[in-house]
Amino acid sequence: MLINSLVDEVNRRDASLRIIKSILQNNGREGFYDLTGLAGGFPILTEDKALLETYAGPAVFEEAIQILGKIHLGGEHVLALNRTSSGILAAVIALVKKGDEIVHFLPKSPAHPSIPRSAELVGATYREFEDIKEFEIGENTSLVFITGSTMDHDVITKKDFLRVVEISKSKEIPVIVDDASGARLRTIVYKQPRAMDMGADVTITSTDKLMDGPRGGLMSGKSDIMIKIKSKAHQFGLEAQPPLVAGMVRALENLSPERILEAFGNKHDLYNALKNDFSGVKETPTGIMLTPEAINLELNHRGLTTDFNHDDLAYLFAMLLLRNHGIITIPAVGMPGASATIRIDLASNDAERISTQKIVDAFKDTLIQLINIIDDPNICKSVLYY
């Protein structure tokens, strides 16, 4: 294996950032294409800069984030956090005790690692389900999570969502919805109601996923639960600072459903252009994806086998794509625990600057390069880490 630990994942990410820095120095911002769908941004106004202070910022932007956050997510009280994972951690600390159980329903496993890791941190047990017929709540369950859209953009059905809420409410167990990208995908593409409108007690989204906000978390929910979570967030320094909140406010003001819907339509052209050379390519709501298993399948079709596991192949593919074509995907730059699936998100800002043919050519060339190095572990390590 090439990636054996969280430390290896951090080192891989650091190598990616060095490559991006080199591209910036040599070719400027136009030299790479961030197609992760997570590029976000910091769209503050000139007049905002003078207010990005410890006390002036909250005095100005707190009211705005409450108004815009409720419009986007519903709920009674909004809390801005420095990451979605921070909000999940604050909620678990506030609502779960040692020996309790957290139950999680999602359309497809695995869950984002922030939920099981938070459970482990407080000494709670953790179970997850992806089949609604098997979903159940135990005697020690104190919190239920629902994932609206997975890391690979598998979206929960409205029927399953409502059923999990119904079962949870019958046991008086609070429901938190991890709607990191789902707050846009579910509602804009699949026309589902907001999580709070379907009976959730709390919902949280990422302000850099399919919108132009900074990397941060925006949580909303019922006031009695939110005050508990907010107190823990402030106790452990998990709340968003004024510059982050200002960026969230402007991003919510600029949110464009039209761009997401345009990507939903354009994905078919990219999928059709790739499917003859990559039989395992799949469509996502706003683009295409190539799973680690699909990359291995392409090698097998060409009579090649390897001792590397599937995720290693995806990491290599992503790093080659970045090094040689300037295309950024999540396996290259993602945080430890992120999905290893190669995903091209056409809702990304940079998608407007790169043609379908250029993406296709980059994928074909990258596969050839992967085939050429796959038998040399030392070269593979240098691709990942140097």
Image (cartoon, grey):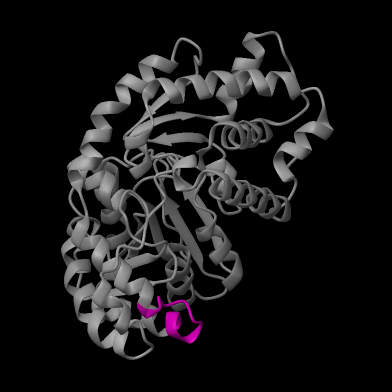
Pinpoint residue 325: horizontal percent, then vertical percent. Answer: 54, 32
Q: Is residue 242 visible?
A: yes
Relative to 310, is 175 on the left or the right?
left
Is residue 324 or residue 288 the one in the foreground? 324
Above/below status of 269 relative to 47: above
Q: Residue furthest bottom?
A: 55
Pinpoint residue 312: horizontal percent, then vertical percent. Answer: 68, 35
Which residue: 40% across, 58% down?
145
| Quadrant that contains the C terminus | top right
Pinpoint residue 347: horizontal percent, then vertical percent. Answer: 31, 40
| Quadrant that contains the N terminus | top right
Which residue: 82% across, 26% down?
376
Is residue 230 or residue 376 the one in the foreground? 376
Q: Which residues are magenta?
A: 232-242
Which residue: 42% across, 44% down?
150
Relative to 93, is 385 on the left or the right?
right
Above/below status of 306 relative to 60: above
Relative to 287, is 18 on the left or the right?
right
Q: Is residue 1 visible?
A: no
Is residue 120 or residue 322 the one in the foreground? 322
Q: Residue furthest front?
A: 26
Is residue 56 or residue 358 the one in the foreground? 358
Pinpoint residue 328: horizontal percent, then vertical percent. Answer: 51, 41
Q: Is residue 237 magenta?
A: yes
Q: Is residue 346 magenta?
A: no
Quarter of image, res 199: bottom left
